[in-house]
Amino acid sequence: MPFLLVALLLLTGAAAADERPLRFSVSESWAMPMMHIENGQATGGILYDLQTRLAQKVGRQANQLVMPRKRVQQMLVRGEIDVRCYVNPTWLQESHHQYIWSVPFMIQRDLLVAPTPTLIRPEQLHDEVIGTVLGFSYSRLEPLFASGQLQRDDARTQALTLSKLSVGRNHYAVSNELALAWYNRQRPANQPLYPVEQLSEDLVACIVRDEPDVPTMALLRALVRMKQDGEFDAILARYR
């Protein structure tokens, strides 16, 4: 093999090895099956698998940074996060013009949940304390919180919100559909928490920082391929 060709291959390999990991944000409020966090480290879950696979597809490592939700927002504004997944435009307080939206990869459904089976709309409730997640906004409930008809009881994570409901701290709480199903899997079969009313249904996607040090278009194309090839559905199926 000619010397110049060998040198070129060595340089190319070294450049690829020197490429820094991609920085993915992980909100510490996430719960299984979306994300398992242990000792401040992301270790598993739907989003962990998705983000790890996404980085692999562009030849990078995934640095999954666990942090409070408010810090995620601050780092996005400063461009210190390369990819944020599991987000909807209506959930963001800023425009984040330096980021590009990916195709949606799943639907999140937020549910009003209770310890007993019942059917009731939140607008029919009065003077109830609703279990919620700190920093999360619930569009259908916000007017009821603002008027004082209902009160929030914030917990740090989605799992803690459901735990407080199960021990009787509240009569109702809000949970996304997947977190509720996962939580019920860990409970005795005769003690599930029940969905009362669907509050919202939102498409969720990723945002990718559009800067020269990020393979932005390659990441966006990889997400399209993962969706088309059924890779995300396969990840989701592992946690159902």
Image: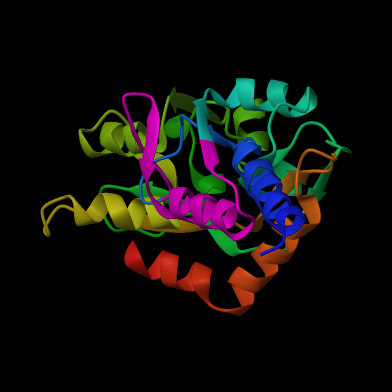
Q: Is residue 235 magenta?
A: no
Q: Can you say whether 29 is above or below 201 in the image?
A: above
Extent of the magenta region: 34-63
State the residue at coordinates (38%, 50%): 45
Q: Can you give x and y, in whole percent of width and height, for residue 23 in the image?
A: 61, 35
Q: Which residue is most to the right?
A: 97
Residue at the extreme bottom of the image, as rendered: 229
User: In terms of depth relative to the viewer, which is nearer, 149 or 10?
Assistant: 10
Please tell me in which quadrant of the rendered image residue 96 appears. Answer: top right
Direction from residue 119 to residue 233 in the image, left or right: right
| Residue 24 against residue 72 in the figure, above or below | below
Q: Residue at x 72, y 61 (%)?
A: 2
**Quadrant position of residue 166:** top left
Q: Residue 180: x and y, percent?
A: 35, 52
Classify the position of the C terminus by image quarter: bottom left
Q: Along the line of sight, which residue is nearer the eye, 95 or 5?
A: 5
Marks counted in the figure total 0
Nearer to me, 145 or 182 = 182
Q: Look at 42% across and 25% down and name the residue there.
A: 156
Q: Considering only vertical position in the picture, is 134 above or below 181?
A: above
In the rendering, at what x and y percent does residue 115 appear?
26, 47
- The residue located at (63%, 49%) in the rendering is 13
Q: Is residue 199 visible?
A: no
